[in-house]
Image (spheres, rainbow, N blue to C red):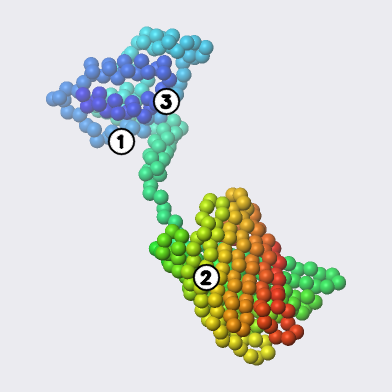
Amino acid sequence: MIKFLLSGVLHLLPDRFIARNGSMALIQALGCDFAGMVDTHQTRSMGLFTVAEVRIGNAFSRIFARDSTRRGGSRSQGIVNARDQPVQRRKVTFLHDLIITRILRGRFPEPTMNLHNLIAILFLFAAVTVNAAEEEEEVPASPWAGKATLGYLATSGNTENSSLNSAFEISYTTGDWQHLFDVSAINSTEDNATTAEAYAAGWKSERQLSEVNFLFGRLNWRKDRFSGYDTQFSQTVGYGRRIIDSEKHSLNGEIGAGARQSDLVDGTNENETILTGALQYTWAISETAEFRQDLLVEAGSQNTYIESVTALSARLIGQLALVASYRIQNNSEVPAGTEKTDTFTALSFEYAF
């Protein structure tokens, strides 16, 4: 009975690969084991069962064999032919003749590792690996995210020009909180003379109130050599709302209040209370293209600062994208002889992580 049960278990996996015409002969082969049940008073050794299993490859080579009479013949005729095949214990084309019979009778042939054995072992290992992979739990997403941007352009000839723009942004999300830090730098020269030089750094923290409402706190530091303001530093807090949040479009709006300290290039400084407003719009044009529009306004009693950033990105490969951007910075009040508006056009590579 032990032999019969073990034979049935070993039939389960290979039986999936046996042609339909061989199923009848296989059933008869399994049934013939009743005649050779183990005497309950007869001692048997099962210690070397694992050693004998390496012969599984020889059985697999028989399983995958196909009777040439199947080609062009009907399926019903093949079943009839299968029933007419003689069933002999020494010629049963399956695992119980090669493994179970020899184990129960105490015969343990020397294992031989041939190509069939190796294929069978690899097949069984792959089946177990696939099942284990399906049961693995999904790895949670990392709370960290960010992107790095770099663009450089140089020309030579009658005039020598070069421009460099770079930026780095990283965010961390935990529970209802999200923190964002970003820095950027722009530098441009013409005939070894600096024509543009600007730096910026910012920190923003958001506290989620619901799926669409949040509170925020923001710190912004800016330095623009040619804007009339040497440095501007603002601190604001306020309320934000996700106005649109769909698969392709998203729009966030923010309003707040705070303070700003400014140092002008003429040596004077300004300290004022400000009101702020911001909009961030994103349009997922396709799976690889995205349009972004950001607008920030800081309005004070002595100066109103407006910044607009328009960007179009197209993913090249993996997380690498090509980004074309246009930035406008405007101060309503500047020292005499200074332009109120600065614009920056850039073409750069962006890597998200």
Outermost right residue:
158
Q: Which mark is residue 17?
A: 3
How far apart are labels 3 and 1 at the CA level? 23 Å
- The reply to whether callout 2 and callout 1 are in contact (CB within 8 Å) is no
Type of amino acid under label 3: Phe
| Disc number lying in front (3 or 1) | 3
Residue located beneath label 1 in the image: 50
In this view, the residue in front, 293 or 126, is 293
Q: In the figure, residue 291 lies in which quadrant?
A: bottom right
- Picture coordinates of residue 88 (x, y %)? 32, 14
What is the three-letter code of the residue carrying label 1?
Thr
Residue 115, x across and y down, in percent = 46, 32
Q: Secondary structure at mark 2?
A: strand
Q: Residue furthest front?
A: 301
**Residue nearest the observer in this picture, 82 or 122:** 82
- Seen at 21% across and 21% down, the residue is 37
Q: Residues within 10 Å of mark 3 (few under 14, many from 20)?
A: few
Q: Secondary structure at mark 3?
A: helix
**x, y (%) of residue 52?**
32, 32
Q: Quadrant of residue 222?
A: bottom right
**Mark 2 burial class by Cα count in 10 Å: few <14, some 14-19, many 20+:** some
Task: Quarter of the image for the N terminus: give it.
Answer: top left
Which tag, 3 or 1, sits closer to the chain's start? 3
Q: Which residue is farthest left?
A: 41
From the top left corner, tell me how far across and down residue 30 is, in percent: 30, 19
Q: Of tags 2 and 1, which is closer to the observer?
A: 2
Query: Label 2, on which residue?
Result: 255
The residue located at (35%, 18%) in the rendering is 26
Chain-order first, disc 2 or disc 1: 1
Foreground of the two, 54 or 301: 301
Q: Nearer the viewer, residue 196 or 274?
A: 274
Label 3 to label 2, Cα distance in Å? 68 Å
